[in-house]
Amino acid sequence: MNGSMFRVIVIILILGLIYFGLRRIWRDWSGRFRELDKAQRDQDLAKRQRDLAERQRPDVIDLKRDKDGKFRPGGRDDADRS
């Protein structure tokens, strides 16, 4: 084996190690990001369900946007207010 053939083999070996290392890093990160996204979706779903259940409580007031753009409790006539 002469020197140039040895160099080619070493370069191919190094490039292969870099390729497989980057591929493994990519897969690890992708998997971790998928886990984080799933955890965030689960958290958002739980938060949404809690908000929907909380809306059904009798002490929660629904606010409606009035003609002037302010939010006020619905069903109340605010025409007498100036």
Image (cartoon, rainbow, N blue to C red):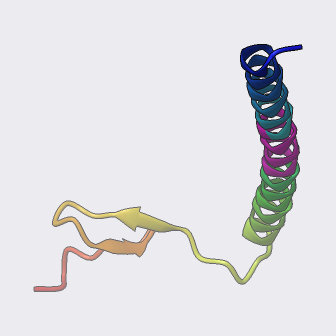
Say if 23 sits above or below 75 in the image: above
Residue shown at 78%/71% (left/top)?
54
Say if 45 sits above or below 1 in the image: below
Whole-percent x, y for residue 50 in the image? 83, 67
Q: Main secondary structure of the magenta part?
A: helix
Residue shown at 38%/75% (left/top)?
72
On whether residue 14 falls in the magenta region, the answer is no
Whole-percent x, y for residue 61 in the image? 59, 76
Say if 77 sits above or below 43 in the image: below
Residue shown at 76%/22% (left/top)?
3
* Quadrant in the picture for the C terminus: bottom left
Residues in magenta, as a range:
22-34
Residue shown at 79%/33% (left/top)?
14
Q: Residue 77 or 58: which is nearer the viewer?
A: 58
Q: Residue 28 or 82: which is nearer the viewer?
A: 28
Q: Residue 34 or 25: which is nearer the viewer?
A: 25
Residue 80, picture quadrant: bottom left
